[in-house]
Amino acid sequence: AGQAWRTRVIYETNLRTSYAAGRWAQLTNPQLLAVRPYWRYVHSDSVVNPRPLHKLWGDRRLTLRHDHPFWRTHYPPNGWGCRCRVTAVREPAPGDATAPPAGWDAALESTGAPAGIDKGWAYAPGASAAGALRQLIDTKAATLPAPLADAFRQAVATLPPAPQS
């Protein structure tokens, strides 16, 4: 007991956030996006005290295009202990919610984050890393001779697309 709970929370948070960043890279792969351009919010039923909005999004099978602004702030994990995830699908299934609930993007005065998102969690793990990496690639390629720059860019063509603002 003692301090073990804190260590466990930190470890699990780092684990889930790292997994989410890697999953972002998989989900934004152009080859996958060509066949599965929609993402579905999946709530984890393994949590003891589920967050009502996370459960709602999962129960309604919220399914939006990968480039919907919702994913920039609501891509899980969305807080401490959140075990939600996202899965890629070809298209929304009958009965899936295809629009986020009204007010989803309004920041709460108490946290500065949208409802259902813990303070400091309104971001998509992995999205910012892809943009920084793409910028580094472009900077490096600009210093290379044209044939080498073309080969370099082609070699990294499967990277996730740059986030859209």
Image (tube, rainbow, N blue to C red):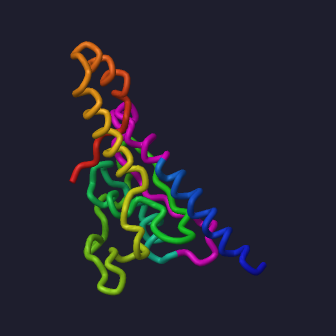
| Quadrant in the picture for residue 155 | top left
Tally of numbered discs: 0
Closer to us: 89 or 74: 74
Residue 39 coordinates in the image, percent (x, y): 39, 50
Q: Residue furthest bottom?
A: 110
Compared with 154, 130 (above or below) is below
Name the quadrant of the C terminus. bottom left
Q: Residue at x 28, y 40 (%)?
A: 135
Using the rendered view, name the quadrant where residue 118 is placed.
bottom left
Residue depicted at 63% across the width and 62% down the height: 11
Can residue 30 be found in the magenta stretch?
yes
**Vertical placement of residue 86 versus 33, above or below:** below
Q: Position of residue 83 (x, y in %)?
A: 56, 63
In-front residue for pair 11/91: 11
Q: Which residue is found at the position 26% from the left and 75% from the top?
A: 106
Give the residue furthest to the right. Answer: 1
Give the residue drawn at x 39%, y 36%. 29
Observer-nearest of 16 and 35: 16
Q: Is residue 10 left or right of residue 141?
A: right
Start-end of magenta stretch: 22-50
How far across and down, in percent of the image, does residue 104 sit?
A: 29, 71
Vertical order, 66 against 103 (above or below): above
Which residue appears farthest toward the front when viewing the image? 143
Q: Nearer the viewer, residue 89 or 48?
A: 48
Q: Residue furthest top?
A: 147
Location of residue 43 in the rendering, given as x and y in whole percent from the top left corner: 51, 63
Q: Quadrant of the N terminus?
A: bottom right
